[in-house]
Image: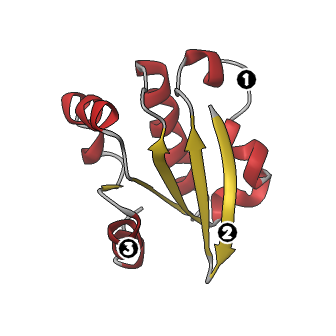
Amino acid sequence: MKLTVLSSEGGVTHVQSEGEITIVDVQKGSNPLEQVLGAGGFAGKVLLNLAGSEFIDSAGVGWLMMTHKRFRDTGGALVVHSPPPLVQHVFQLLQVGTVIPVADDEAGALRMLRGGAS
């Protein structure tokens, strides 16, 4: 998985994910999102675009859930959006949307973020 900050404007940071999100990426001991945002980044508002990640395993889902919790615990917010069909299927099976805000697209993610989703 490769994470790239696309923009940071209006108090919202847009991050793009590319490649599979698997245990290989999240077992290294550090949070991949922290590597691109910095330690203070979890106090901000982040939209994570998953359009470029065609696969996620259970470790990847666990990483997203732990990352979401870290955002909430530090006063920030994370909204995931644009999951490809296979990722969306995994999210539905595991009911990820009951824990993490998941939007179909960026516009929906912005609405969730402004509506107080965290």
Which residue does the numbered mark 2 point to in the structure image? Answer: 7
Exactly how many numbered labels are in the figure?
A: 3
98 left or right, relative to 1: left
Percent of width and height locating residue 59: 48, 20
Which residue matches tag 3? 116
**Where's residue 58, x and y in %?**
41, 20
The image shows residue 13 at horizontal and vertical percentages of: 62, 67
The residue that appears at 68% across and 35% down in the rendered structure is 31
Precedes in sequence: disc 1 or disc 3: 1
The answer to whether 30 is drawn above or below residue 99 in the figure is: above
As helix, strand or loop, the secondary structure at mark 3 comes to loop
Circle 2 SS class:
strand
| Residue 3 on image: x %, y % | 66, 43
Q: Residue furthest bottom?
A: 10
Q: Residue at x 62, y 31 (%)?
A: 1
Residue under the image location 75 percent in, 49 percent down: 36
SS of the residue under disc 1? loop
Q: Residues within 10 Å of mark 1 (few under 14, many from 20)?
A: few
Label disc, if present, on residue 29 of the rendered structure? 1
Which residue sits at x=53%, y=20%?
A: 22
Using the image, tell me which numbered label, if any, was put on residue 48.
none
